[in-house]
Amino acid sequence: MRHLLATLTVLLALPAARAADPRVGLRPAYGSVPATFVDSITPPAAERGTTTRVTFTGHGFGPALDVWASLPAGGLKAVPVESRPDRVVFDVTVALDAPVGVCGLRVATAHGLSNLHLFLIDDLPVRPGAADSPLSLPAAAWGTLREGSRDRYRIAVGAGERVSFEAVANRFGKDADALVTIRDAAGAFAAEHDNSPGLGFDCRFEHRFAAAGTYTVDVRDARFRGGDTHHYVLRVGRFPAGRVAVPAAVEAGFVGPVSLPEVPDAAFAIAAPRRVPLGPFDAVLKRPGDHGSTWVPVTTAAGPVTVAEPFDAGRDSGLSQLASPPAAFAYQLGPGRLNPFLAIDRTLSHGRAQATPAVVPGTLCGVLRTPGRADTFRVRLAKGERLFLRGEAQSLNSPAELELAVTDRIGRELARGAEQNDEVNLSFTAPATGDYGVVVRDALRDGGDAFAYRVTARRDPFPPTLTAEVEGLTVPQGSYQPVPVVRTGTGSAVKLRLVGAPPGLRLTPDEIPTGAASVVCKLEADAAPLGVHTVQLAAEVAGEWVSVRTRPLIDRKLENVDLISLALREDQRRLPAAVADRLAVQVTPPAPFTFELPESVVVLPRYQKAPIPLATTRAAGFDGPLTVTAAGGQLADKNEGRTRLYAEFPDATAGVVAAKILSNLGKTRVAVTATGTHAGRRIALTRTFDLEVTTAFRVAAEPAQVKLLPGESGRMKLLVSRAKSFDGPVTLRLTPMADVTFPEVVIVAKGATAAEIDIAVSPAAAARQQNLTVTATADVDGFEEEVRAAVPVEVRAAAPKKN
């Protein structure tokens, strides 16, 4: 995809940066680190309807209990076989009707849930790959991409036989780039595929073999990189090689056909879920006679779905000739002198725009097959009616970079919107009642069979995006874990509710207050049954229920030299639909201690320290140590030289947070976790507070604005408000102003809160308004802090002299 070039450039620089200095450049860093962490799953795939022995490798494992999966209920069952601190083994049975595609797995042990790891469910026979070995079709062969090496398979095909290939590696959330190369028996090149748009650095394609024989299929990393955790699956056989579906949206409960534009002359049947709230899902598609299935993104939508009508090339050619300059000149020579086809050509319904009738609200779908050609839809709007449009393409596996426009009935453009953050948003108010065109095109005027799009049209603004900042929770019975929920913008109250929760699991509070951008909820497990559960979080916005999304961290994220996290890779951002709309919850036995933070907000003056009070109680019989850690915002390791903030907890009764140099002012959420071990089980409880980093003092003026006439003088008080931990002297430097006299330097003594100064205006001063800049400096625990304030000064115009 076109967006991948910048990401690839950054990642290719990784080895060089590390080689120069291990402290400089990119380095791996965990996100929100669960104590139980899965690095890899072997094998990385399982065939549905079978039982597979699966090994989870990582660290921090306790006695294995179960495996959580982002599949529908009953889609996967796991029986523990082996438990070690660095690995656990399960016999995993995948249901025969489990959806094919990439899903998410978590290990549940006595210590709690692990991080999320991605895994493939396939309906092709899954088998381990062997170097330079024959591969009978169909198959899903798995292996490992290792540095500087390749795996080679031999397949036998007939003349004219069509075989589909797919490499799944990058979609496991790893920095892998699988390259598939096909050669004939003599070593002659037959085909090579690297990246398929929408599949990250993976590929999916069909190849027709002209001659019968034995061919070799090589799989390697395109950059000759790799590692023990860079697994791949090579799918080979007969299955649909398309990546996008049309329509890309269907109404909830829809049962019927869709097409894959890249797979001509084939129709596929899908059954959409009836769930509320509406949202994306992966449609599993298969033709009669296929060996296996493919999966493509689709969403359930409210209102009718309109698909752009096929382009009529004959009509386009005819109008092009009838409205051409030679035709217009010919009409000018005739008695009418006016070419009627010029007006017809400009209309939405009858002209070359070939607009498809659509309704609002609704969803508009299609494919930009021809480079340079747009799709147009005709909608009816009343005067003053608002139209809100949101276009998507890249979330559908499409390479299109969308551009939306609204035109009047004769094609004059009235509004335009371009793609930002993988979608286009455009709002429009109709100036008059009538027909309007919604034009969809590729910003680069490109096109092809894979250039699918989806445009949602509404009369009301789109609801805010809501995100839960956690997605895997281990909750002891009788306790809770925090679930911060944030929304874009602010507005009216948003009601929250749990969907699919077992009895005894509840969310409090269950509302984002009016005007608030976030809320920290408690997921409480008073009497919920032990074990793993899948829960969705829904939000009601103006009577409409929408999903609260999650953002699980796959693999590791990277930090730069200044400990600032870099943007996630595409394979870490574009996750399977069933992974990003649900919470994984493991309910465990009661915890032997409780842990709370008495202060919801901790104020930290820069260059100083602030206490973090803790309140812990222990159950009878539990006297083991508690370890307390904090994460979030600018917090980092105390001993790292570039750390801006750090927190430490010498014991489990109190902590301290400290600000070093270059710390940024502002408020961030901090998660504090207390961990203890009891009867061989590790228990961790997390609580949150808001950390507000501020300056140790602030400056203001009284009065807030000075107003004087020419020749007048007055007094102004400069106020210094101090943090409780700072009482040192503050030096105020006042920027000179023409024709206005005041002291240039003022000292506010230690412990004092104000200093009074005289200010005088020259009789010759011109009337004006100007800000007086006050620069305040002070020594704060050995560091110079600087604060600035602006005091408005108005020199008023003198009254005119009377004759």
Image (cartoon, helix red, strand yellow):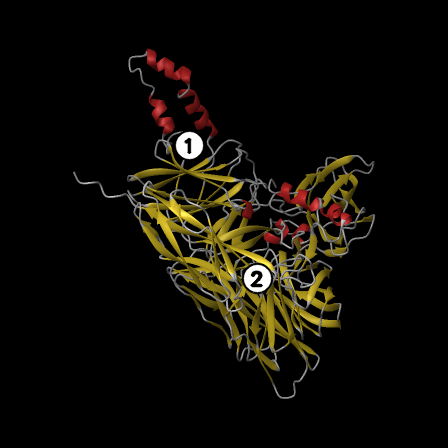
Across and down, in percent, residue 633 comes to 57, 60
- Specify the quadrant that holds the N terminus: top right
Residue at which label 2 appears:
780
| Camera-side residue of 393 and 246 | 393
| Camera-side residue of 284 and 226 | 226
Q: Residue furthest top?
A: 333
Which residue shows up at 53% across the image and 42% down it? 452
Across and down, in percent, residue 514 comes to 39, 63
Which residue shows up at 49% across the image and 61% down it? 697
Q: Is residue 584 visible?
A: no
Q: Dot 1 lies on which element?
A: loop
| Camera-side residue of 489 and 186 | 489
Reply above or below: 402 against 338: below
Q: Residue furthest left?
A: 803
Q: As shown in the figure, which amino acid type bears the numbered disc 1?
A: Ala
| Camera-side residue of 217 and 739 | 739
Residue at which label 1 appears:
353
Q: Dot 2 lies on which element?
A: strand
Across and down, in percent, residue 502 comes to 52, 74
Rounded to the nearest angstrom, the CA distance separating label 1 from label 2 is 68 Å
